[in-house]
Image: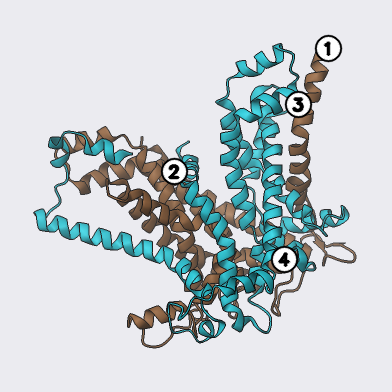
Amino acid sequence: MNEHVISKQPAGLKQSVPREPGGHAGRIAVRTVMWVFLLATALLTLFPLLMTLAGSLKTGAEMMTGGSLLPAKLQFANYAEAWKQANFARYTWNSAFMSVMVTVGTLLVASMAAYVVDRREFPGKRIYVTVQASMMFISVGAIVLRPQFDLMVALHLNTTLWGVILILVSAHSSTFFMLQGFFKAIPRELDEAAMVDGSGFIRTFFRIILPLLTPGLGVAGLFAFRHSWNEYILPLVFTMTNPKLQTLTVGLANLRYGSSAAMQIHLMMAGACLSILPMLLAYILANKTFIQVTAGSVKG
Amino acid sequence: MIYKWRRLGENSLFLAPSIILTITLGIYPLFWMLRYMFYDYAGYGEALFIGLDNFRRLLRDGLFWESVRNTFVFAGGKLLLTLPLSLLLAVILNGKLRGVSLLRGIYFMPTVISTAVISVVFYNIFNSYNGMVNTVLMKLHLVSAPVDWLGPKHAMLTVIIVAVWGAVGNYMLLFLAGLQSIPQDLYESAAIDGANAGRRFWNITLPMLAPVAQMVIMLAIIASLKGYESIMVITEGGPIGKTEVMYLYLYKLLFPVSTGSPVAQQLGYGSAVGFASAVIVGAVTGLYFFFSRKMNKVY
């Protein structure tokens, strides 16, 4: 965006600005060093992903002996093998189920709370907001997993993924604050008009306000989905005795163990590709959203 | 009157899910920890009140202090590499270059990828025998023999590299947001006054960026002290405890890990370690705030 604005300005002022020492040749040298640095960094960033892709298309023997960067012959059958024999179909389903439920749950819980907090006054409102804000910062590590786990056992929710889902939904404070910002942009007159027309509070929220919040829900949902799709330690703890419930992250990490681990590196790489792909696609499609929301968090 | 009760009912209905979840799964676990840190509790059987014994044990626990030391080495290494690199990238990308958005998109990409998944990948490509890192280094003749990346000598460096890989793009973007909020006319008037690029950077960019940088660095410090997921996947704290960081040690006190770990499950003591770890992170953050307070006062 800036590029165009700047380049259309009259050349006079801008041209006189860069006065690096060494004149023309020096400037070219500086530019070259800069571009080498930028491209090298980009290459290093992409390196593990390129190796994942290459590795996922090699044979198990190729991976085991190492030595060559690219596969001799593309082994697309690795994906079928990972999907069927290495249980990645199940892991993918578990990850998808968990992430969708967490996203829906988080959006519902956080949007309802954010709506009331934004539109109404009630006793304890400040306390509620303060607690939500501090929930984002207090972290005592894995210790909280233990009481959370015991609670889910008591509720018999540890034999399904619902325990994990509830715990992930309970961490909805960042979504809450994000959605509160979006609610502020919807004029209050709209709620009032709807209520004057006889629409109740609940109906107004679900029928009129929530549809208007769709863009905000999309943005917040993207982040909630990313968080749960990539979550590792929580599903790991919950599925230790129940391998059927393992998500992609857990199933993949567990492939490192076991007697045939060394012979399965190609499957590990295929599995890694499978689990990275949805997020990468979402990132390519919604690149601006990811970048703007992350950047917005420091602008204040 | 009915109207008022009705409003109260609606408010409660809309807030109830959030409040119930926050209390049971957010706040209650904190109090659970604050209670059990005074108990001898293995996770089964009876919990025995032992007063401050867990903290006495903590003071003498060599493994814990070793993990604290490792945490600072890990966090220090990660920050020393990540922060200058991400600031440099941000400053360059803030200039008017071709292809800025593509490069920015590439650098930021690691943040959308699962730490655990990419750590499994790194675990494989850093393998000394058949890993791709050694293959590339040897093809480029940068090393003559395979480097034992996951061995006791280099394991810490390896997990730091992985952490830097995952973090640079994120902090680059945060710095970039700070840089873009600096008003352009400051640069223009400085240029008219004859300030060169270097002086403009020192006298405008750095001081104007300071308040944002103060916050970005704080986030980076907290994240680097708390991160243990990738270490857990790549080295599990090994070999011989060389990469055991505070929060990973804590994890091992609470849940079993794959290989025969010398750490036995002990929830009471784990609570004390969790509390102590949080205090250490809090103290570092507090000290940082004290020493960086000038950064926020420039303008």
In the rendered image, residue B159, in percent from the top left (x then y), is placed at 51, 70
| Chain shown in brown | B
How many other residues sit within 10 Å of disc 4, few (<14), some (14-19) or many (≥20)? Answer: few
Which quadrant is home to the N terminus of chain A?
top left
State how far apart marks 4 and 1 are (Cα): 58 Å
**Which residue position holds label 2?**
B293
- Taking the image as drawn, is residue A52 in sight? yes
Tell which of A144 and A100 is nearer to you. A100
Q: Is residue B12 left or right of residue A139?
A: right
Judging by the rendered image, the residue that carries numbered circle 3 is B11
Residue B294 seen anywhere in this rendered image of the structure: no
> Which residue is labeled 4 in the image?
B56
Q: Nearer the viewer, residue A162 or B92?
A: A162
> Callout 2, which amino acid?
Arg
Mark positioned earlier in the residue sequence (4 or 3):
3
Q: CA distance from mark 3 to mark 2?
A: 40 Å
Quarter of the figure with residue A209? top right
**Labels 3 and 2: the sequence-earlier one:** 3
